[in-house]
């Protein structure tokens, strides 16, 4: 087990224990607000191109959650889902993915296969040579991505042509510079961005 994995496990286990009351409160809020499961599962592409199901708190009405992108004031989002997305609390269950070894706390954000197909082959192999993560450079830069795309006339086209190349550049930067100190720095930067 390498130092990155040890760091993840040592952070996630106490984190899940401390956050368990919050998980329960959010779960009750989701169930009271709309029908459906508490969690939303979606196939994502992880390290070495291996697929896994990312876990999030459900923020949409179940029958309307097929589209891959969420933009602006999306009508599919539930009332509590708006708050969970804005505060990024919907991402908390990904700590379970980290515990299972499918993700890391820090690493390139995992995409759906549809968008990974747009990665140039050499870049794809390089970016996916490390564990995907909950946060990274791109997550901090594009923390308000759905608002940006909400102002677009062609959100999916703009995501693929404009945002994805920038994200890939950030992902490559992370892979090149990766270290435990960088992971800790990006975690603190993520918390700072959320608090601000």
Image: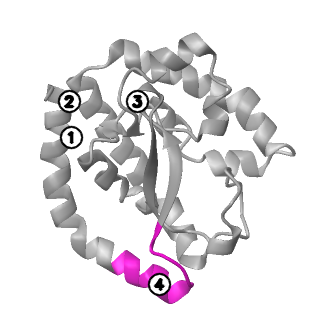
Q: Which residue is mark 1?
A: 8
Q: Which mark is residue 31?
A: 4
Q: Nearer the viewer, mark 1 or mark 3?
A: 3
Q: Which mark is residue 39?
A: none
Task: Compute the Cα span from label 1 to label 3.
Answer: 16 Å
Neighbours of disc 2 within 10 Å: few (<14), some (14-19), many (20+): some
Q: Which mark is residue 47?
A: 3
Along the line of sight, which residue is nearer the eye, 83 or 157? Answer: 157
Q: Which mark is residue 4?
A: 2
Q: Earlier in the sequence, mark 3 or mark 2?
A: 2
Task: Compute the Cα span from label 1 to label 4.
Answer: 30 Å
Asked if marks 1 and 2 touch (Cβ < 8 Å), the reply is: yes
| Quadrant housing the N terminus | top left
Residue 70 screen position, x and y as percent: 67, 55
Residue 142 screen position, x and y as percent: 56, 39
Q: Secondary structure at mark 2?
A: helix
Q: Which residues are magenta?
A: 25-39
Q: Residue at x 17, y 65 (%)?
A: 18
Q: Earlier in the sequence, mark 4 or mark 2?
A: 2
Task: Compute the Cα span from label 1 to label 2.
Answer: 6 Å
Residue 75 visible in this rendered orientation of the protein? yes
Q: Secondary structure at mark 3?
A: helix
């Amino acid at each position: 087990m390498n130092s990155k994995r040890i760091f993840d496990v040592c952070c996630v286990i106490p984190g899940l224990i401390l956050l368990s009351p919050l998980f329960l409160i959010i779960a009750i809020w989701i169930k009271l607000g709309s029908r459906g499961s508490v969690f939303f599962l979606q196939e994502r592409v992880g390290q070495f191109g291996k697929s896994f199901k990312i876990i999030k708190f459900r923020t949409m009405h179940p029958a309307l959650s097929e589209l891959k992108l969420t933009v602006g004031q999306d009508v599919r989002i539930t009332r509590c889902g708006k708050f969970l997305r804005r505060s990024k609390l919907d991402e908390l269950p990904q700590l379970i993915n980290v515990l299972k070894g499918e993700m890391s706390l820090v690493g390139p954000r995992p995409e759906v296969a549809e968008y990974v197909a747009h990665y140039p082959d050499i870049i794809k192999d390089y970016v996916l040579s490390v564990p995907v993560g909950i946060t990274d450079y791109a997550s901090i830069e594009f923390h308000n991505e759905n608002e940006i795309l909400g102002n677009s006339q062609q959100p999916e086209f703009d995501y693929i042509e404009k945002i994805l190349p920038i994200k890939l550049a950030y992902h490559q930067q992370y892979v090149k510079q990766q270290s435990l100190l960088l992971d800790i720095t990006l975690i603190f930067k993520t918390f700072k961005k959320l608090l601000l």
